[in-house]
Image (cartoon, rainbow, N blue to C red):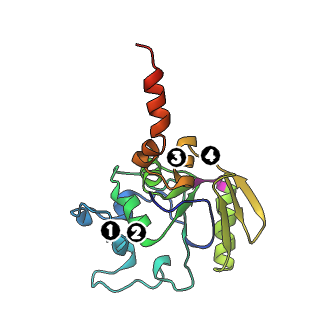
Amino acid sequence: MKQKFTAINSTCVPISIENIDTDQIIPARFLKATTRSGFGENLFCDWRYDKQGKEIPEFPLNDKKYSGEILVAGKNFGCGSSREHAAWAIHDYGFKAVVSSYFADIFKNNALNNFVLPVLVSDSFLKQLFDSIYENAQTAVSINLENKIITNNSTGKSEYFEINAYKQQCLLNGFDDIDYLINNKSIIEEYEKNRKF
């Protein structure tokens, strides 16, 4: 069982680039490991560091004014290959949610399976959110998973987001797929006992 996900109220790290693919999220040369830990240090590696391994100061993950548990990203986030390591890296870095106006389907599912909430918002809400963060890096965002509402605390504007009902329940209860089955063991056993063949 993982930590339950109910609500987040956090500042954000903005990366307004569109069409960020999974190779940019975690470059292929880091995919040799088979455990999920340690990927966070290489999140966006080729954008965070120059060829000498020095931090690129203007990249948001290196900019000290940005921090928080929410990554706000440009449209079409997580496109490209289906590597689950992209979700591992985002989670391992410390992000609990990614906000964008479009997610690649495979990335979205990988994120949900790894306790990272992909919050799909409208283009206009995303633009206003970027504007708020760039104007004030301390802009906080509230995400209420139970009610499926995201709020830009700077403007007070909220938007409803969709999430698969099963995955919502898993996140709210801190369940992966195995935990969910174990938690429903008595119901499954009762069904099997009364099932007519």
Mark 2 residue type = Asp
> Which residue corresponds to the image point at 33% horizontal and 81% vertical from the top-left?
50
Mark linked to residue 162 = 4
Mark 1 residue type = Ser
Cα distance in 3D space between marks 1 and 4? 29 Å
Mark 4 residue type = Glu
Cα distance in 3D space between marks 1 and 2? 6 Å
> Which residue corresponds to the image point at 54% horizontal and 71% vertical from the top-left?
69
Mark 1 crowd level (few <14, some 14–19, many ≥20, 10 Å Cα)? some
Q: Residue furthest left?
A: 32
> Where in the figure is residue 46, as x and y percent of width and height?
34, 72
Query: Which picture quadrant has residue 65?
Result: bottom right
SS label for mark 3 = helix
Question: Marks 1 and 4: which is nearer the front?
Answer: 1
Q: Reading the chain from its start, which is encountered first: label 1 or label 2?
A: 1
Q: Which residue is mark 3?
A: 167
Position of residue 153 relative to residue 191, above or below, is: below
> Where in the figure is residue 63, as x and y percent of width and height?
50, 83
Mark 4 crowd level (few <14, some 14–19, many ≥20, 10 Å Cα)? few
> Which residue corresponds to the image point at 57% horizontal and 54% vertical from the top-left?
172
Cα distance in 3D space between marks 4 and 2? 24 Å
Q: Which residue is mark 2?
A: 92
Mark 3 residue type = Lys
* Front position in the image: 189 or 123: 189
Q: Is residue 124 left or right of residue 174?
A: right
